[in-house]
Image: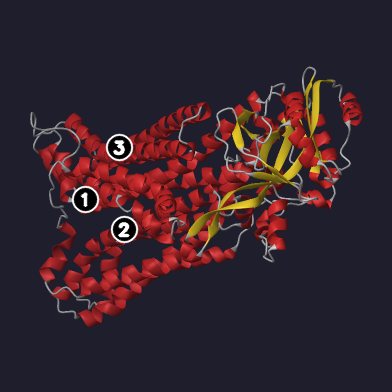
Amino acid sequence: MSQTINMKQMEQKLQKADRKQSRLYLFCNFTALAIISAYSALMLSPTVQRVFPEGGDSRKQMYMIFVMTLAGCVVFTIYALGLFFRHKSGQLGILMAIGTSRRRLAPGLFREVMLLSGMSAIAGTIAGFPFVWIIWHGFRLILVDSSDMALTFDFRCLFISLLFMLLVVGFACLTAWRYLKKTNIMEVIREEHINEPVKEPGRWCGPVGFLLILAGAVLGYGAPWAFQAWFHMYSPPWAGVFYAPVFPGLYMVMLHTVVHGWRRHKRNPYKNIISRSMMKFQGRQTVNNLLVVTLLIAGGCFAVFYLPANGVSMMMRYASQPYDYFYKYQADQDVPERDEVEALGKEYGLTFQEWGECVYVSLGIGGSTDIEEEGMRFRVEYVPMLNEARVLSEDAYRTLTGQEADVEPGTYLSVTNQEETSLSVNQSAREFTNMVTRTQLDTEFAGYLHYDLLVDDMYCCVLDNDDYDRIAEGLTDEWKGRIVQFNVDGKDSYAFAKAFYNRFVASFDETCERHRHYDRVSKIRYDEAGEEYWADTFDAATVSYENSDSFMFRQFWVYQPDFRILDQNDYLRNMSVLFMMFLFIFLVCLVTAQVVCYTRCQSIALNNRYVFDDLRKLGASPAFLDKEVRSQCANVFRVPSLVGMSGMFLLFTMILYANDGRITRAEWITMGVCLAVLALIGVMIYGVYRGSVRAIKGRLGI
């Protein structure tokens, strides 16, 4: 009994036979959209935006890694799409061979492509939100929790997912149209079995690629300084193009890996020839995948380096701090005096020693600054009343620090940290200004003093006693202040530190509710010039006593005290959002990279199953086949991991050096911790590699 099969039924049968490749495409597309959706949801979340300083390095780092991840996901999705259509071509060729016109095939093909692409994209976008929620609350449950970590979403992040979704569907439709336009039916049918070898370059390709990567990193990172030094202009938005040599460099390194490998084969040209040939014959796909993995691993390493870079320096600072308690305040504030502090300490069984205090004044200090002009240009100009400076006399500095400070009349010494890496120093001042009487004191820079506790975002200077008395005459209490420091006799108490902190903050009125970057002298200068001061309209430059336990307040309040035990115990809680964000980015990048590696290993090995079957029939031992599988997988995992990790470590080292022209002790320790982190990442990658080898051997029956 014959059965008539119409065209729709035939298409359905062919699609059913092609389910494996459809599932792979769905999985890859779903994964890419879930990653982009999750990353953008967290990146644009008010929880994260509140904590990451606008224009700060941490926010720039977050955005840069997002761009790298986005580029990796685009390449990954295009690869999965190409793989799907390579297998789909057989189905199209069969239908064309029996006389089906392209016009008849087009509606069904576009319907299937848009259904698969759209379905997986929508599912991935939706899945990104619960994925973020589960990971974030897992962090809160296992690692650290605080009020700052209450996660909220800004659903404008869906615009990024929507754009990526349109990109995916657009590429899918374009690829479908390209396949329908092919005229050679036999070529369409055989497309699945056609290899994609790359043109074999010389062995110079790999070394030149590494040089391009290095050149791109140096040019890209150095471009802002070059624009300022040579052209007296700020770095334009397009300056990121100087990083461009990194990408052809990466491509050349991966191409060298696929075509030649990194071992000489002259003595034994047939060693690993099978695994090398399998990679070479599918070179284009392999190179694209290795590029994606390299970018993802590099982005993940850059993210995770933030943790030791910040944590090591802060822990060392707390450990080396000479006093348990150090704080400063305006003279017109009702801050607890010594007897009140000692009475509070007795409630917690504490007594204090090495109590020291001194007075200071706040003055206007002149200096050279950049004056913006049109076209992002600037000119360097001296401003007599540039910023606010905290100024001590010789005697006050000696009382506070125990250090001698012999300042010549008519000069000033600038206070910096021991390693002289602080940016809060002024070497160009020609005068100090009394902000009440507007009396000016002519002066000039005469060198440095070193006391870490006095170093913050405000300039701190020391004057000759007579000069200090003369310039301070007539100042009101709002321009005067006091600095106090003391140690605990014995073991400190966190409960006391917390109680004292709360009482300390409560003793200030609204005139001191200022951000540490809010400069009173700059504010007066702008007002007198009839211009608007930037901090008056910038929401990020505000702090509130109501949130005195929040990250923003404790990081940016102008009178934030240094209480060692409080800072040490609350450090992780205060930095929780930043740390969790970068840890999340690291996990997303690393997991995605390993998924791509695993998928690529499966594709190469299983698409060449017939090679292993033929070798088995020719008498190849299981040990030989096992070695070939391992060699194949090792190339996919090893090279992008080494390039991504080593390249990012070198870039990180360059950044540490470029910040202040040296590598400090804390930075050396940070680099050591980062190397240990890289070793741990290597162990994790090796574990996935071993799992991939076992899975492939199981499917090949080895």
Q: What secondary structure is marked by label 2?
A: helix
User: Disc 1 residue type?
Assistant: Asn
Look at the image and tell me whether residue 211 can be seen: yes
Location of mark 3 (residue): 638
Residue 226 or 23: which is nearer the viewer? 226
First in residue order: circle 3 vs circle 1: 1
Q: What secondary structure is marked by label 3?
A: helix
**On screen, 28 above or below 140?**
below
Q: Quadrant of the N terminus?
A: bottom left
Residue 630 or 420: which is nearer the viewer? 420
* Residue at x 42% of width, y 33% of height: 678
Query: Residue 173 has which mark?
Result: none
**On screen, 347 above or below 241?**
above
**On screen, 401 above or below 517?**
above
Q: CA distance from mark 3 to mark 1?
A: 21 Å
Residue 632 in percent (x, y) is at: 23, 39
Location of mark 2 (residue): 80
Location of mark 1 (residue): 607
